[in-house]
Image: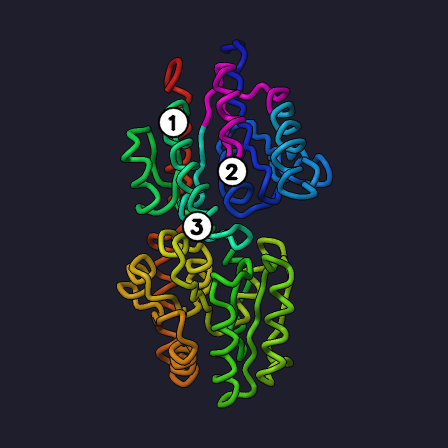
Amino acid sequence: MDKSPRPRAAKVCLLTSVHIAFDGRIFHRAARSLAQAGYEVVLIAPHDKDEVVEGVRVVGLPQPKNRLHRTTKVLWRLYRLAVQEDADVYHFHDPELMIVGLLLKQRGKKVIWDVHEHYPNSILDKYYLAKPLRRIIAASFDLFERAVVRFFDYVIYTTPFVGHRYQTMRVRSGPVENYPILKLSETFRREPRERIIYLGAMARPRGLVEVVQAFALVAGKRPSWELYLVGLSRPPSFEQELRDLARKLGIETQVKFIAWVPYEEKERLSCQASLGIITYLPHANNTSCLPNKLFDYMLVGLPVVASDFPLYQDVVEPNRCGLVVDPARPEDIARAMLYLIEHPQEARRMGENGRRAVLDRYNWEQESRKLLRIYETVLQTQGGN
């Protein structure tokens, strides 16, 4: 019998200073998949304690008091904790952590940069920055990233539009999309009610003023229907603005606000709805990224009402899983909502089409194989990238 010691499992350290510890992409997709594949996985993220969850050791960071605190004290503490872990691969998820990634590369570590958005476009959409300042910061970020990204071992991105930036930079990169985890849909049964649902952060660029206005038109004809808005507001005052709008339109009892809920709970709420809404406004970042909530709706068999952006159309129209509308026109959104309400058999077929598309193509089980192949490539590469 061979009594030689088993090789040590490669140690992976995922890093975020912005996202919650149990973020959908970072924990539920990447960290859990890596742990299930046999890696030793550590996640350093904002959290109130250290704990082990589903094979992932979570190391808690203090919640930042503000943006300045996040980019000074929290960032420095994250770096020191990362160094203490002495991992084989560091996988960071926030643009502000590029500095941390460079410092870890100086220590001879493998580093993966996981790009969640088209960041120059995202900066252009920051409501708290003056518009001229946004352009300056976006251009500065683009120059800085182009200068440093070549030092990282791999860049992971979502959507071809985002990936095109990194292809022009001639760095080793590849897509891993935020598609749904199929297993989650097996937990809940479909119990559709007279309910329209929106999932995700609530902010003005996501078209929720227009959604509430559209729903008021729907409620005038279908008073038994409800609109569920599930997620945190950015800024927090935006929720009150939406509440005031609903009250002004006479639909305050039909618009329900639910704050952040655990990842799995979103599936249950979706299963209780009859259609999903994802009508982001045509801001720079919205038109360049696909919201994962679109696929979450499809997974549980919800027909969708989505913005008429090319990226969204390329999913919704070929798969016949919903309707696309001008997101800036509440009357168009209302017309699509009413069509699905008044044509339940067609709406059900659209929902079935969407679910079938997710089962066949748009699912994390397939994307996770891409992630594991990327890790194999990075670990097998000798020296730098």
Q: Which residue is mark 2?
A: 94
Label ID, residue 147 = 1
Residue 367 is a magenta residue: no
- Numbered disc 3: secondary structure: helix
Residue 364 seen anywhere in this rendered image of the structure: no
Among all residues in the image, which is located at the extreme right?
49
Measured along the vertical axis of the image, is residue 148 above or below residue 137? Answer: above
Give residue 319's position: percent from left, percent from top. Answer: 30, 64
In magenta, the rendered stretch is 82-111
Q: Amino acid at mark 3?
A: Leu
User: Tags 2 and 1 in contact by the CB under 8 Å rule?
Assistant: no
Q: Nearer the viewer, residue 120 or 311?
A: 120
Among all residues in the image, which is located at the extreme bottom?
221
Residue 191 seen anywhere in this rendered image of the structure: yes
Q: Which residue is mark 3?
A: 124
Measured along the vertical axis of the image, is residue 204 above or below residue 158? Answer: below
Give residue 24's position: percent from left, percent from top. Answer: 53, 48
Location of the C terminus by quadrant is top left
Query: Callout 2: 10 Å neighbours few (<14), some, many (20+)?
Result: some
Q: Amino acid at mark 1?
A: Ala
Alpha carbon of mark 3 to alpha carbon of mark 2: how far?
17 Å
Residue 86 is a magenta residue: yes
Give residue 179's position: percent from left, percent from top. Answer: 42, 50
